[in-house]
Amino acid sequence: MNSKAKPAGPSKAEESNELTDKLDTVRDILFGAQVRETKEKSKALEKLVEATADRLTKDFDKQIKRVEDSIAKLKDSLAKQAKDTADDVKRKFDAAHADITALDKSSEASRNEMHEELSAELEALESRASSWNEDLAKQLEEIHNELLNSKTDRVSLATLFLGMAESLAPEKSSAKNKKS
């Protein structure tokens, strides 16, 4: 068995790790301060961004709250105006309704009063007409009796009829007398 033994030396993985460590050390020596400074600046920038984002969020929330408050005030104001307008319209409607009711009652009272007056006038006219009819009937009866009992000539009879016609239509005879 011929085997060659390899000397026990570092393996490739170990050599690679050592090389990486050495490179990191060299990098740290050359760029360490710059990397640390960059990391610090990056952390400071992150804090600034977070602080600015928080401040912007708070400002935005405040503005949203102000807008919501303004909307609520405007809504309350509009609701109050709508209620006031509705109350005013209702008040005017009630006043108009009361005026119409009063006018209707007044109109009905006037109509009833006029009806009563016209009924009274009608009764008075009917009474007068009845009285006139009775008077005329009596006069005709008297004339009839007189004619039956006495002999009258034609001229007297014409005069009598003319007088009777004038008493039946006094307006027409007055108008004729005025024309003559």
Image (cartoon, grey):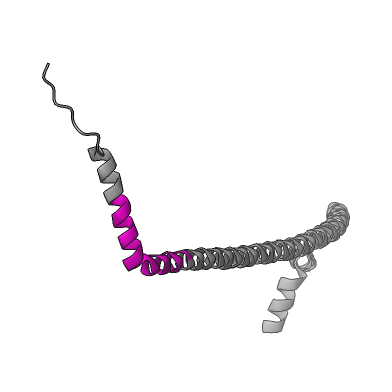
Magenta stretch bounds: 20-43
Please say whether residue 128 is visible from this viewpoint: no
The spot of residue 85 in percent (x, y) is 69, 65
**Quadrant where the image shows the C terminus:** bottom right
Q: Is residue 148 above or below residue 8?
A: below
The spot of residue 50 in percent (x, y) is 51, 63
**Which quadrant of the structure image shows residue 84?**
bottom right
Residue 138: say if magenta: no
Left-right relation of 23 to 146: left
15 or 39, which is in the foreground?
15
The spot of residue 10 in percent (x, y) is 26, 39
Please say whether residue 80 is visible from this viewpoint: yes
The spot of residue 51 in percent (x, y) is 54, 66
Q: How many marks?
A: 0
Residue 37: say if magenta: yes
Q: Residue at x 72, y 80 (%)?
A: 177
Left-right relation of 54 to 25: right
157 or 40, which is in the foreground?
40
Q: Residue at x 30, y 45 (%)?
A: 17
Prevailing secondary structure of the magenta residues? helix
Q: Residue furthest front?
A: 2
